[in-house]
Image (cartoon, helix red, strand yellow):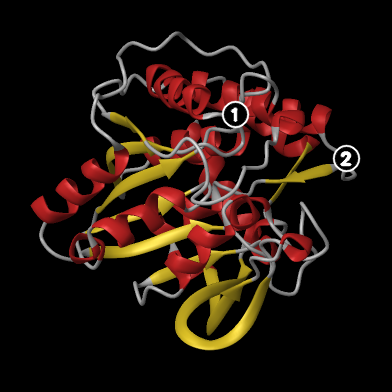
Amino acid sequence: MTRNVIIDTDPGIDDAIAILFALSVKGLTVRGITTVAGNIGLSNTTRNALRILALADRSDIAVYPGADKPLTRPGISEEKIHGTDGLGGVTFPDPQSAAQDGDAVTYLAAALNAAQERTLDILALGPLTNIARLIQTDPDAARRIGRLIAMGGAIDEPGNVGPRAEFNIANDPEAAEIVLQSGLPITLIPLDVTRQVRADRAYLDRLAALGTPKASTARALIEAYFASTTGGESRPLHDPCVPVFALRPDLFGCERTGLSVNTDEADRGALTRADSHPIDVTMTVDAPVALDLLARALG
């Protein structure tokens, strides 16, 4: 069975790998891409989405720009990790198509209303601003989402932009709170899981040996990640966990719980278990199988 998905993203080194994976597997059909400001500004995330599609020879897929800032406050840049271009300076082809004129939220609503109810999933790789705006402006369309699978948050794991906060949630905590309290069918993939799916030097050698443009680019992206961060002999592949879950949810173990988002600046984006709308939160993953699946798809 093929899952129809729209990818909402802020590419982003690991976003790029996630998108290349989603475009490479038979079990996922990417119907469109929406972009959001996050790792870098919206103009760059949109251009990067188009560059990724060009590399994958899938410039037929439409890209719709979305929110250029969080709902109520300034965003957080991750340029120090992803580079000024957002892709770590890795070479990509120029875009072979232009971004669409329409707004991401308008597109999401139209796509959901046109599809059979609960047959279109959203894979959220960045801040949840676009999804929150959809819930606010067209809640009926939002309720037609099959499943929202989002990378974000830290449950029992330390944060990466604060003691308890993860970047995607902390970038727009108000948006995250709207989404998590919406009652939509949500699977959240936090740092607790993504930090288990790690690429080491042997994995980079495996990608190099595959020799395909996608695998070679993924290797270069991970090399850029090594260069811009610290963390021992491996690096976590955060966003690729989202399409891997969409394809193989059996690889993950979930806890069903409500979560609330701290919107105070001092602890911005921290998640707390709460007596609220329950969602599925992944807490375990078969990391070797996930990494193998990723490499084979890019080969």
Q: Is residue 57 above or below residue 17?
A: above
Q: Of helix, strand and loop, which one carries label 1?
A: helix
In this rendering, the label closer to the viewer, 2 or 1: 2
Q: Where is residue 275 in the image (x, y as percent from the top left)?
A: 54, 91
Q: In this view, does 222 lie above or below 137?
A: above
- Label 1 sits on what residue type? Ala
Q: Residue at x 44, y 8 (%)?
A: 94
Q: 10 Å neighbourhood of mark 2: few (<14), some, or many (≥20)?
A: few
Q: Is residue 286 visible?
A: yes
Q: Where is residue 265 in the image (x, y as percent from the top left)?
A: 73, 60
Residue hosting label 1: 218
Judge by depth and name the residue closer to the eye, 167 or 49: 167
Q: Where is residue 115 in the image (x, y as percent from the top left)?
A: 12, 54
Residue 230 has which mark? Answer: 2
Q: Residue at x 22, y 59 (%)?
A: 138
Q: Of helix, strand and loop, which one carries label 2?
A: loop
